[in-house]
Every structure is written in structure tokens, then in C-alpha cells.
Amino acid sequence: MGRARRHPQGDRDGVSGDGADRTPVTRLVTGGRRSEWTGHGVNPPVWRASTILFDSVAALREATRRNEDGDFYYARRGTPTQWALAEALTELEPGAAGTLLYPSGLAAIGCALLAVLRPGDELMMVDSAYEPSRVFAEKMLRRIGVATRYYDPLIGEGIAELFADNTRAILMESPGSLTFEVQDVPAICAAARARGIVTLLDNTWATPLFFPAIGKGVDISILAATKYVLGHADAMLGSVTANAQWYGKLRTSAQLLGQFASPDDAFLGLRGLRTLDVRLRRHEANALAVARWLAEQPQVARVLH
């Protein structure tokens, strides 16, 4: 949903640029704005649709053949509301080829894993991963013949010593869910790349604003956009941003599985994105104040922050 011949993302050649022309904060505010999507408004409206009408059978056949992002075809493939959010998220990740939207963060994680794994593969998952990710691995991936092994989040480049012949993918989460370990993501990615292992990162806590994962060597960056992108506890959304090697495969899998986010939720996600910088910095300040206060309380044995 985020990349197209007519509507390429980032610097208009289908790959997000290095951001030299605009700061990340500026990209938050301006990303995904195109006159053909917004008209005379600042942001795109909610484009609701299911069936799309064509002027001729030939036009329908051409849309079917092309199957390009940014082309109207059927609402599962998106409307300008979803395209705008996908493009905005891609612009936050220098080196990314595109972004796909999902109805929840767990849907994004699950579909990304299904796109890269096959029977007989091994997934290495950080031991501090989001619990639903672990449950998905143990109850769904195991059923299709994919084994999961867990690793210490602070292992860094030492992860190379754990690779097996069938290790296919690594799912990182940094900071770790609940325990907040910060992994050496570039070192892990370098070790994986040397063995042809795909790297996925649940980047929900940091967001691409604080950690542009694709530029750090990650192949696939995943967000539970429900948390910080939406940010107001009134909708659910997930996203997957990938490099050129993996974006096409992820897009095909999403289409086969019928995965997409509604235009209403995408609209709320795009609206939330505009204030992400302000909200995250307030979260950071407030959380640090609470952590410092807790550290002084005799009832508290340890603060994880």
C-alpha cells in the first residue's frame, strides 16, 4: 500500500531518502500530503469504499494486471487515506521501499512472520518479546512446522554463535516489552546479514522517530501503531515498513491474507502522527519523573526504565 509507479514514496523513486531535505519532525507533519489525495484540504479525508468503478472493461483489466500501489482497484488495496499514512510512515524510514497497514499490531507481526517463514525454518525471537508474539510463535508457527528459539536481548553480535543451519529469521524488540532492554540492533543485523538471515524489529516503543530501523540495517520494521502513532486509545492499527528486498513479498502475502486497515483507522493514524513528536517527548519526561520517584521508594526493589 505504500509504494507505486505512479505514487512512489520518499524521494519519488520508490525508496525513502536520507531526509537531508526535511527533518524527521517535518516529515511527521508533512508526510503523505499530495494534492490528488487532499484536494484543497491540508490532510486527506476519509475515503470509504468497497467496490471501485471503472470507465471500461479495459481499464479494469489494466488495473488487475498492474496491481500497483496508488491505483484504485478494490478497497482492500486501499484508498488515498491509507496511501497517505503508508507514505508518511515510509518517509520516516530512510532506505525503506514501502509500508503496509494492518488492523492491529499483532496482525502486522503475524503476517510479517508468515511472509518470511516456511516449514522447517527456525525463528530466533528475543526473550523479552511482546507476549502475544510468543504465543503466535508457539501456537501458530509451531503448527506449520516452524520452530522458535529465544535469545538474551543483550547478546549483541554474539548471536552469531547461536545460528543453526535452518535459522531463517530473527524477531527483535528494542526496547524490550515490559523489561526495556535496548538491543545492539546494528550488530545483530550485521551478523544476520552475513548468514542470509532476515531481520524483523518490533519498533513500537521507539517508533521510527527515535529509531529509524531500516537505516540501521533492519529488513522489516513493525509497529503496533495503536500505541504511539494513534496515541489516543480509540482505534487499533499496525504497520510493516520494509526494504526493497522484502516489501514486495510482504505486499503479496498481505493481499493473499486479505490484510488491510480501514480508512477510518488510517485517518486517525495519520492525525495522530502529526503530534507524535510532541507526545513522545512528554511521555519521555513524565516517565522519567515517575521512574526517579519510584527509585526513591523503600517498597520498590528495582525500577526498569
Image (spheres, rainbow, N blue to C red):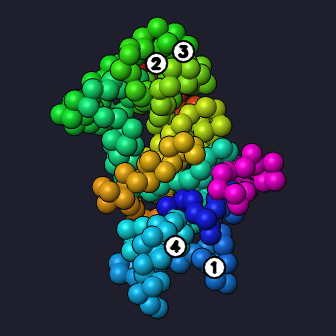
Which comes sooner in the sequence, label 3 or label 4? 4
Disc number for residue 36:
1
- How many angstroms separate mark 3 from mark 2 (CA)? 8 Å
Q: Say which residue appears at 61% left-offset and 58% top-offset.
A: 88
The magenta span reads 11-29
Q: Is residue 279 left or right of residue 137?
A: right
Q: Nearer the viewer, mark 4 or mark 2?
A: 4
Which comes sooner in the sequence, label 3 or label 1? 1
Location of residue 30 by image quarter: bottom right
Disc number for residue 56:
none
Q: Element type at marker 1?
A: helix
Question: What crowding class fits label 4: few (fewer than 14 Cα within 10 Å), some (14-19), or many (20 or more)?
Answer: many
Mark 4 residue type: Asp
Answer above or below: position of 305 versus 232: above
Q: Which residue is mark 3?
A: 156
Residue 272 x, y percent position in the rendering = 54, 59
Q: Which residue is mark 4?
A: 71
Q: Which residue is mark 2?
A: 153
Q: Element type at marker 4?
A: loop
Q: Magenta-highlighted stretch: main secondary structure? A: loop
99 inside magenta stretch: no
